[in-house]
Image (cartoon, grey):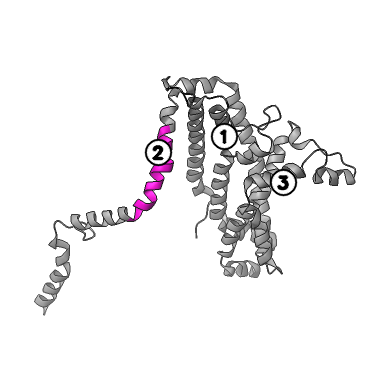
């Protein structure tokens, strides 16, 4: 009896030894290689566009950043000269400060606005499906269209916003014609457009929270605010983390609305990093400096993202 059991056990283990030296999980080197080639075969359709349209241009930009080039004449090697010139140019600091100013104003507005909408549409509200579609509609609308509409709404002379303010006795600001109000105008337009995206992400997170936790909190006597801060927000932290990371990356890359609403004006008050990259390339013919500035922006975005990923352990709750 014991001999037959031992033979059965050996038969069961035999395939692990049949094609070569086994690994800890019973796979042979041949099977592991076959598995790796299978995975690569499925990755190739997405890897090829990634190499051609993302990694390839990044490497090319790094090479161009080491040259002086106007897109027409042959490139001239300058080494790190473009980076040195950008670091000593006060305009570089200005455009980074304007970009940070945009993010500081945009991120709280779009997050808390999206959170309020998500909390409201997560209740038994009549017509909530229609409202979800209405609030999400600006997300799929072209940025140029949204920017031009907001440029008209915030027109200092005949805009609806200033007309409404004048009706209640308030003189509206110059908005995109005023250096102090140009960036706030862009922030308002950007927040309005992206509210729907944040709302959908947070709404999905809210619907994933088990209702048993709310029932238990009610039994313990927790009110609405206590449930919000003790149950909702902690369990919503993964969705919040995703929204913050994506919004910060998009914030550093802001361009379309700035170009359409103010073109960086007035007097450069709303010029951001990506617009400076665009201007250096196509207006001033300094593609090498533009490539160097793009890599500087990449380094900043990468550093901020890494800090967020490492810091998530302290405040993000999974499960």
Q: Earlier in the sequence, mark 1 or mark 3?
A: 3
Question: How far across and down, in percent of the image, does residue 98 sit?
Answer: 64, 32
Mark 2, residues whose alpha carbon is within 10 Å: few (<14), some, or many (≥20)? Answer: few
In terms of secondary structure, where does tag 2 sit?
helix
Task: Give the residue number, with chain letter if any, for mark 1.
Answer: 274
- Main SS of the magenta part reads helix
The picture places residue 213, in percent across and down from the top left corner, at 58, 67
Q: Nearer the viewer, mark 1 or mark 3?
A: 3
Q: Is residue 39 magenta?
A: no
Q: How far is the residue under mark 1 from the one under mark 3?
A: 22 Å
Q: CA distance from mark 2 to mark 3?
A: 36 Å
Q: Nearer the viewer, residue 172 or 207?
A: 172
- Left or right of 134? Residue 278 is left
Comes first in the chain, label 2 or label 3: 2
Range covered by the magenta-colored residues: 42-60
Question: Which residue is disc 2 drawn over?
Answer: 56
State the residue position of label 3: 149
> As drawn, is 80 to the left or to the right of 102?
left
Asked which secondary structure carries label 1, the reply is: helix
The reply to whether the magenta stretch includes residue 57 is yes
Distance of label 2 from label 1 (alpha carbons): 19 Å
Q: Quadrant of residue 156?
A: top right
The residue located at (16%, 65%) in the rendering is 15
Label 3 neighbour load within 10 Å: few <14, some 14-19, many 20+: some
Observer able to see residue 82: yes
Q: Residue at x 60, y 24 (%)?
A: 91
Residue found at the very far left of the displayed protein: 3
Front one among 223 and 97: 97
Q: Is residue 237 above or below residue 252?
A: below
Looking at the rendered image, the quarter that the N terminus falls into is bottom left
Q: Quadrant of residue 265?
A: top right
Residue contact between numbered discs 2 and 3, judged by CB atoms under 8 Å: no
């Amino acid at each position: 009896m014991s001999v037959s059991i031992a033979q059965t056990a050996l038969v069961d283990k035999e395939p692990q030894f049949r094609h070569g030296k086994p690994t800890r999980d019973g796979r042979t080197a041949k099977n592991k290689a076959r598995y790796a080639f299978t995975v690569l075969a499925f990755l190739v359709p997405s890897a090829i566009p990634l190499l051609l349209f993302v990694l390839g241009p990044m490497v090319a930009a790094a090479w161009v950043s080491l040259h002086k080039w106007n897109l027409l004449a042959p490139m001239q090697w300058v080494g790190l000269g473009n980076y040195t010139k950008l670091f000593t140019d006060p305009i570089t600091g200005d455009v980074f400060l304007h970009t940070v100013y945009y993010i500081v104003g945009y991120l709280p507005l779009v997050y808390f606005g999206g959170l309020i909408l998500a909390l409201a549409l997560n209740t038994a509200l009549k017509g909530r499906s229609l409202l979800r579609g209405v609030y999400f509609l600006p997300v799929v609308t072209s940025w140029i269209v949204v920017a031009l509409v907001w440029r008209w709404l915030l027109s200092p002379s005949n805009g609806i916003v200033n007309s409404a303010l004048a009706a209640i006795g308030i003189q509206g600001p110059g908005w995109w014609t005023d250096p102090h109000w140009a960036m706030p105008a862009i922030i308002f337009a950007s927040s309005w457009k992206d509210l729907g995206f944040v709302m959908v992400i947070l709404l999905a997170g809210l619907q994933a929270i088990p209702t048993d936790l709310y029932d238990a909190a009610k039994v313990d006597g927790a009110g609405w605010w206590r449930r919000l801060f003790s149950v909702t927000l902690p369990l919503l932290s993964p969705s919040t983390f995703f929204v913050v990371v994506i919004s910060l990356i998009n914030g550093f890359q802001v361009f379309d609305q700035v170009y359409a609403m103010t073109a960086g004006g007035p007097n450069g008050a709303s010029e951001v990093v990506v617009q400076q990259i665009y201007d250096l390339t196509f207006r001033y013919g300094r593609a090498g400096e533009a490539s160097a500035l793009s890599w500087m922006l990449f380094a900043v975005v990468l550093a901020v993202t890494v800090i967020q990923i490492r810091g998530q352990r302290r405040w993000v709750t999974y499960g």
